[in-house]
Amino acid sequence: MGIARRRRTGRDLTVSLVVAVYGVAEYLPDFLASLDAQDYPHERMEVLLVLDGAGDDSPVLCRKWAARTDLRARVIETDNGGQGRARNLGLLQATGDWIGFPDPDDELAPDFISTLLGAHDAGAGMLIGRTLIRQRGATVPHPLDFRFRRGVRSVDVRRSSDVVQLSTHEVLVRGDLARRCRFPEDRVAPTFEDGVYVGRVRVLNPYCLVVPDAVYYYNKRASGDSAVQTAWDRPGRYVEQLVDRYLPFLEETGGAYWAQKTVLYDLGWYFGVVDRGEAPSIPGLAAQHEALMRRLVERLDSEQIRRAPWPHLSAAARARMLLWKGEEAVAVTGAGRIASLYTRVPFTDSPAAAAYWGLVCGYVAHGAEAERAYQSARCVRLTQQARQPRL
């Protein structure tokens, strides 16, 4: 599949930006200014601002901007129904050859649209730009930034399943595909609606184009009050997120390896939050969540868990998942030695429990004790430090 690396050609393509607006008055001026600053022909751009029952000054700001901008802008008003429903409403009216979903508390580099469409590949269903994170005056790469190290490249996710895509804010989706898919509209599960939407697009077309020079600035709020930042305090993150997001995602994608790697990437954050004791203390939540995690892990291949390349998905997390999968013993190796040994049954006189949120899934020993016990153990081996994918 040939890549058309044409910086200023293909400018007859139209693009629609569907923007769900709720409670972002503080950030809207900079976001809207970044749209005005786009160097792509403004007559080829359409902006649909969907006011999701916004209770602050966002509606006023949007209407004033739509009246003065030279972009083709429309304001769509609805009662508060959540980001998924707002985007779906916008999709019904979007007319572009390509459709994007930027968030109104972020910013687009001036050449974001032109760089994506200038590099477009006729066979790709999705064009992926590069997200940089801004917080407290600093700009840092996203954890998935390694995807851009090889420059502009065409990817078939069926053969390069490590190209995980969790968000829609920095992508453009081919219009015919975008309009055939919908975002989840339930509101109890706080995140991963973007992941579900991306999965639905990829089932229809597994080809994407990675474009590192198309930069999207994600503004991580210092106040910590964005939907993503507050999600870990909500019970829905631990229950409905698994029931209504991850499990259906695996079902709809047929358990494809790229889908499994996507879920494993997200599960790494769960183990970190739970192991650090940062999950909410709500009666019954731990047992309910742990049971759902086991159910979810049943849908993942053991080899995918063992070889998961995400550094934040620790060896301890992978070992516990493999115990859930029924492995009798899991050895974690580091520097050529056995660093830890996880087993389903006790193997020392004073076994230490291997637990998730206080619920025991096996036993663990470390260092010399693990090496001694390993001599007679039949076990799966894991490397202590996961390695990022070689793309």
Image (cartoon, rainbow, N blue to C red):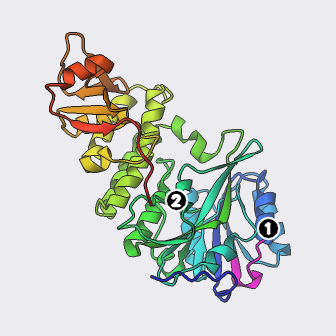
Mark 2 element type: helix
Q: Is residue 244 visible?
A: no
Q: Which residues are magenta?
A: 38-46
Kind of residue at disc 1: Arg
Q: Which residue is mark 2?
A: 147
Task: Decide which of 237, 130 is in the foreground and name it.
Answer: 130
Rendered location of residue 109, percent (x, y): 73, 65
- Which mark is drawn over residue 63? 1
Rendered location of residue 311, percent (x, y): 46, 42
Q: Quadrant of residue 366?
A: top left
Mark 1 element type: helix
Q: Is residue 273 left or right of residue 134?
A: left
Residue sitting at 29 percent across and 59 percent down?
A: 255
Q: Quadrant of residue 282?
A: top left
Q: Is residue 225 left or right of residue 299?
A: right
Q: Is residue 90 left or right of residue 237?
A: right
140 vs 121: above or below: above
Which residue reaches farthest front?
336
Residue 276 colored magenta?
no
Rendered location of residue 247, percent (x, y): 33, 52
Please identify, in this view, whether the residue under mark 2 or under mark 1 is nearer the observer: 2
- Which mark is drawn over residue 137? none
